[in-house]
Image (cartoon, rainbow, N blue to C red):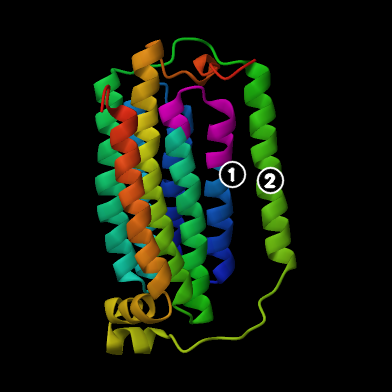
Amino acid sequence: MESIFFFVVAAVAVICSLLVITCKNPINSALSLVMTFFCLATFYVMLDAPFMAVTQVIVYAGAIMVLIIFVIMLLNVKAETVKPNTHAVLAGSAIGIFSMFLTVWFLLKGSLTGATGSMSPQSIAKTGHIEIIGKALFTDFLLPFEVTSILLLVAIIGAVILAKKRI
Amino acid sequence: MLALENYLVLSAILFSIGTIGVLTRRNAIVIFMCVEMMLNAVNLTLVAFSRYLGNIDGQVFVFFIMTVAAAEAAVGLALMIAFYKNRESIDVEDINMMKL
């Protein structure tokens, strides 16, 4: 049952991501990408990570995609009419498919050490996923967490300076 | 429970589709969306490993990757708007102002 569900959602994710790179109209690409993000959120739920699924939907499918669609509509981007360079498409696809086979080959050749940590579905159900993440974020990863806030501040200032005509 | 390989192979496929999109498309916004897709493929790998190895660190990394993606979206789209003001186009073929 779980594997049937996995393969159905995986097929939807792959088809939607193929639509992202084949659609001529950027709006269609953006909407297909939203569907891909929802499929990934489904996988996070299957992997016992509900908080990551919620963040995926809110941050990616919500904030980032709204921003992208907003910019597409603001700039009034037309669908591509120029025919793409066939050689470039062939070379790019060859590189991409080659890298995929290389990755899968390494993947099937390698093996895990078998070491496991303390987290299990039982402990997630007992303590709660958000509490586990919150503990890790505010103890082991406190400095990166604080640095992230500075990164966001710099990004906001940079975006305003780049998009503004005169400061 | 499903084998870990399923998630990793799916993630590799999504990453490669994103790579093909970055290499073949000419519209800067579509390239940007393909980069987001590649970041998401890596996120799926990290969450899958985190679950199967029983360690929360992978999911904390995903959290940081999402933050960086949000910052990247803000700055990247502002760059595109600034470029569109100059050239009336966001085709990557037109981005050649730094060429000698």
* Tag 1 residue: B16
CB under 8 Å between callouts 1 and 2? Answer: yes
- Return the chain for callout 1: B
Instruction: Please determine whether, in this image, residue A88 is positioned above or below residue A148.
Output: above
The type of residue carrying mark 1 is Ser
In the rendering, at what x and y percent does residue B62 appear? Answer: 43, 63
Residue A85 horizontal side relative to residue A3, left or right: right
The foreground one among B38 and A108 is: B38
Q: Residues within 10 Å of mark 2 (few under 14, many from 20)?
A: some
The location of residue A84, given as percent across then percent down, is: 56, 16
Percent coordinates x, y for residue A88 in the rendering:
65, 22
**Mark 1 packing: few (<14 Cα in 10 Å), some, or many (20+)?**
many
State the CA–CA distance, disc 1 to disc 2: 7 Å
Q: Residue at horizontal 26%, vertical 46%?
A: A63
Q: Is residue B28 above or below residue A101?
A: above
Which image quadrant for residue B67?
Answer: bottom left
Q: Quadrant of residue B9?
A: bottom right
A46 or B86, nearer to the observer: B86
Q: Residue at x 53, y 55 (%)?
A: B11
Q: Which residue is mark 2?
A: A99
Please determine whether, in this image, residue B55 is positioned above or below residue B42. Answer: below
